Image (cartoon, rainbow, N blue to C red):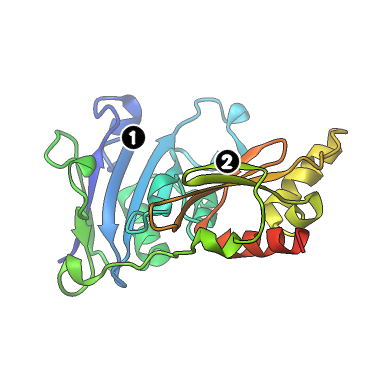
Amino acid sequence: MKTLIFEGVGWADADTSKATDVTNCRIRTRLQNNSGRVIYLEMGCCHFENPKYAPAYAKNLNYATHIDHLFYCDSKWDDRRNFSRELQPLTNIHFEYNKENILKFVNEKLNCSFDDMIVYNNNEVRVHDTIEPLCSCAEGEYKNYQYKDIEININELNGIKPIYGKEWFAAYKISHNSLMQLPYMRKYFENQSKWGQIPKEDCKAYFRWDKNGIITDLELHAGVCMGVSAEDIKTIIDLIKKDNA
């Protein structure tokens, strides 16, 4: 039997905690899936006494599940964010908050094969007391499944002068047209235009890297500060190179 283990982090005596078989209105875990990836998951539930004021996602649900954190914590890049790019679309899934549905979600959407689920409410387990998963459905030892991070060196931008920079940090100009090629930036600009706010051309990409030159963080500044997933680093570097060709 493979048991999906959660730490209960809400108030176990709250009405919303007692109302379902989950026994806690907020739970979290670090699990290892069938492929060996280590995933952090934190979720909770909401109950709206007056359905008239319930948000769209909670319609027709008595205790509606919302996912607040979902990321690969075996990736240094993703471990500093609330959501991994690959997993973020799953946060749009909402369901009745109960053990059966949570187990189904974890198994079907996170590539797991757990048989049952348990929530510990009295500090028997604490997610943040360890870096290892609380539970696993992978074969073999935990150490045998080390994920290799995406690693891109800042030297990729050699020959392009930054707007400003210092040790292990630099800002580069990137055009509005280039940012429009990124779906999330295009969506942001289009929403701003609806409000009559014309995007400025003063757009920048902020890079940080470690002592070996490996990029550890990338933010886009264009009227908004937006963190970028590791999967987009190379694309943005290529856009900067094109802008400076």
* Residue 219 image offset from top left, x and y in percent: 58, 45
Mark 2, other Cα within 10 Å: few <14 / some 14–19 / many ≥20 = some
Q: Nearer the viewer, mark 2 or mark 1?
A: 1
The local secondary structure at tag 1 comes to: loop
Residue 203, numbered label: none
Q: Is residue 129 above or below residue 185?
A: above
Q: Quadrant of the C terminus?
A: bottom right
> CB under 8 Å between callouts 2 and 1?
no
Q: CA distance from mark 2 to mark 1?
A: 18 Å
Residue name at image x 71 percent, y 40 percent = 222
Residue type for callout 1: Cys
Image quadrant in which you'd find residue 194: top right
- Disc 2 designates what residue? 59
Q: Residues within 10 Å of mark 1 (few under 14, many from 20)?
A: many
Q: What residue is shown with label 1?
A: 25
The outermost residue toward the left is: 124
Q: Amino acid at mark 2?
A: Lys
What residue is at 47 percent from the left and 46 percent from the top?
168
Q: Residue at x 18, y 64 (%)?
A: 2
Q: Which mark is first along the chain, 1 or 2? A: 1
Q: Is 93 displayed left or right of 220 in the figure?
A: left
Q: How far across and down, in percent of the image, does residue 94 sit?
A: 50, 48
| Residue sitting nearer the eye, 166 or 147 | 166
Instruction: Give the residue drawn at x 60%, y 60%.
Output: 157
Taking the image as shown, residue 212 lies to the left or right of residue 243, namely left
Q: In which image quadrant can residue 112 be found? A: bottom left
In the rendered view, does 105 fall on the left or right side of 34?
right
